[in-house]
Amino acid sequence: MITLATDFGNPYPAAMRGVILRRTDARLVDVAHDFPRQDVRTAAFWLREVLPHFPPAVHCAVVDPGVGTGRRALVVRAGDHALVGPDNGLLLPAARRLAGDGADGRGDGDDEADEDDATGAPAPGIEAFAWRADDPASSTFHGRDVFAPAAAAVHEAGVEAIGELDRATPVDEVVDLRFPAPDRRDDGADGEVLVVDGFGNVITNVPGDALDGRDAVRVNGEPYPVAPSYAHRDPGDALVMVGSHGNVELAVNRGRGDEAFGVGVGDAVSLRF
Amino acid sequence: MITLATDFGNPYPAAMRGVILRRTDARLVDVAHDFPRQDVRTAAFWLREVLPHFPPAVHCAVVDPGVGTGRRALVVRAGDHALVGPDNGLLLPAARRLAGDGADGRGDGDDEADEDDATGAPAPGIEAFAWRADDPASSTFHGRDVFAPAAAAVHEAGVEAIGELDRATPVDEVVDLRFPAPDRRDDGADGEVLVVDGFGNVITNVPGDALDGRDAVRVNGEPYPVAPSYAHRDPGDALVMVGSHGNVELAVNRGRGDEAFGVGVGDAVSLRF
Amino acid sequence: MITLATDFGNPYPAAMRGVILRRTDARLVDVAHDFPRQDVRTAAFWLREVLPHFPPAVHCAVVDPGVGTGRRALVVRAGDHALVGPDNGLLLPAARRLAGDGADGRGDGDDEADEDDATGAPAPGIEAFAWRADDPASSTFHGRDVFAPAAAAVHEAGVEAIGELDRATPVDEVVDLRFPAPDRRDDGADGEVLVVDGFGNVITNVPGDALDGRDAVRVNGEPYPVAPSYAHRDPGDALVMVGSHGNVELAVNRGRGDEAFGVGVGDAVSLRF
């Protein structure tokens, strides 16, 4: 099984499908091809949340603003999974989750940190390899020319055998990407917006247990009810809830939380009881 | 075979794919993931029109504004097909079609009625079951936590064996959803707009035979030609036709019928000869 | 393997998937379903660029403004591939590429010409057949009623055996579509915009070797740098490059080339050194 995730829109991913299917009859599964353009961080978040639900697979992910520069092509082994994509941090949060115990789709890994993005050793349980591709036909579409062939080759060899492939060279350092950790307090938490989903739900970096036992909370100074799901509020009414990723989310029943709360990606979110 | 239909956009359906593929190697086929958000009626229309073209399958459909409330999870057996989704009427129009004779993609069922939506017995030839899920990991993403596992379990057991599954309890009443019936008259018909498709074609609830033998018709008082297809009119010109669902449609060659006719979903459409 | 490409949006392609899967268990692969509506030329360009990356397959492509008129349904054999769709030129550029040597995804075919679109013999190495369908259920959705069943039938028979099918009648002339050839000059080239992709990259008809050895070029009179890829320029800065199709492209790093260069499909592009 090979999954595909890009910010390419259509029809570019179809060229990747063709390239892969010339090399393997693996099942292909789409994750998404409409990630925000060249937004490595948002794509890394979604990959971390979605890929652990899959059975062992090769995950080919390409959000790659540095295509055609010297950035490396990377293959990462994480447990029974492999990830293939550019060395720009995109793969690392998902790899850490997959290297934990993916059985429940959550894993043990914690990839939040106060530190900024940095180059470093990938993480316990993860092996990283630089991938040597043939001279690519283009300098702008490595999804087709580099990563799709790499994903097919890794799939055919098997995740256990990546290290035996001539094209794969173990590396000790990769470009990393970590999401900011919230500041937990006795009277709430100070966090930030990680992602806004297509419904307008605002996904913060504050773990949902921050809301345990609460039926109301102030968000950036304004009071809101805490509810288990959208329909516990009237249409158009705002609520604070634990979202499907286990984090605190800001939402509106049948409306957009980002608009009601007036926040976007990277904005501060203070929660106070 | 398991089909997937949601209003989730991306990448949420990918989590459902992963959950299913951990449990079965069934073929997965997407119906659509861009149904209008939380619009149960429009999605129910499209499921009714599309699913009968499929061979026997398990159809997992989630448009679910009541997620996280007490609404039940439903499994419906309709002929050789099963449908899995929330108990909010979404599945019933398609189930009635599938319980007819799906061989021609049409079936015998008629799910139009003057009555409003109501709870009631599902229909002849249809069996409904309440599905008991494990305590879901989230209260907002039952597509991943409830319906995807249910679809996989039903697929593995086989449609004939749904009733033998511990999690499935037969129920006599489900939330129903019926589309309004038109008022046929000697000099035309009074109907309404069921759906506007992505081209802007206005799909009414008036059966296409209302146009038999006519080459012109007044729509809400204005005269229009009746034509077999778009290109029988000049680009930009409006026409009335029998659409691919067999209903009267209001269209514009290479343009949008909803704009030309000034109507949207639920609006009245009077046809007079 | 059957690929699907349309301008239908959702959920119409799902009806095609269902119709095909009633007739064959072939693998289905999506190319795109969001081609610009009824824009045969743009879809023909993308099919020519994408399909040669696939292993031998039946490619079902429908962008069909003439649906419901007398235009023929066409099956084209091109090397080990078959193409199925309307006789409006859509399939021909891809067929010429596939009839060359598709091993490198490029082929030898040259489908550029100074002449306008015209009816003519398809090309060396290509066989074309008119397809006789059953009386279609609709006059507007031949993707479902004509082309999907045809693609399934061709797949089941095998590409080599198209000519033996009762429904397939060899034809000598088809509606053709050719892209304009650029005017190469000693001091540059005069071409035009073929397509603008979803990133806003402007794909011209000028072969990339026109930029060989150049690090700057005037485009429609204004000077721009030539660079190998986006990230060689600062975010927001424009560049001229060789795109992934091998043609000269006008782009902006993390921005839209069409807006920066002020050009759209069909506009003239003069390159001068």
Image (spheres, coloured by chain):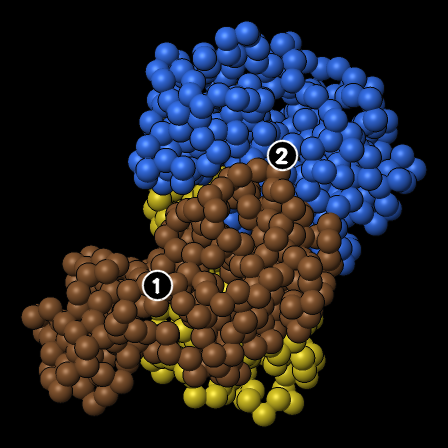
Chain colours: A brown, B yellow, C blue
Residue at the left extreme of this rendering = A221
- Percent coordinates x, y for residue A54 in the rendering: 55, 72
Q: Quadrant of the N terminus of chain A?
A: bottom right
Instruction: Give me the residue at 57% from left, 10% from top.
Output: C184
Residue at the right extreme of this rendering = C164
Chain of the residue on which disc 2 is drawn: C
Query: Where on the picture, by quarter, is residue C164?
Result: top right
Whether residue B252 sits left or right of residue C159 in the image: it is left
Instruction: Give me the residue at 48% from left, 33% from top.
Output: C228
Give the Cα distance between marks 1 and 2. 38 Å
Amino acid type for the residue under numbered disc 2: Glu
Q: Are marks 1 and 2 in contact (CB under 8 Å)?
A: no
- Percent coordinates x, y for residue B79 in the rendering: 67, 71
Number of on-image labels: 2
User: Do the residues marked 1 and 2 share a common chain?
Assistant: no
Q: Secondary structure at mark 2?
A: helix
- Percent coordinates x, y for residue B110 in the rendering: 56, 60
Near-viewer residue (B76 or A124): A124
Whether residue A215 sits left or right of residue B241 in the image: it is left
Above or below A64: residue A175: below
Whether residue C148 sits left or right of residue B191 in the image: it is right
Instruction: Give me the residue at 60% from left, 49% from top.
Output: A146
Chain of the residue on which disc 1 is drawn: A
Amino acid type for the residue under numbered disc 1: Ala
Q: Is residue C195 visible?
A: no
Q: Which residue is identified by label 2? A: C49
Instruction: Give me the residue at 47% from left, 79% from top.
Output: A124
Q: Secondary structure at mark 1?
A: loop
Q: Quadrant of the C terminus of chain A?
A: bottom left
Mark 1 Cα within 10 Å, few/some/many (few <14, many 20+)? few
Q: Which disc is residue B252 wearing?
A: none
Q: Which residue is identified by label 1? A: A118
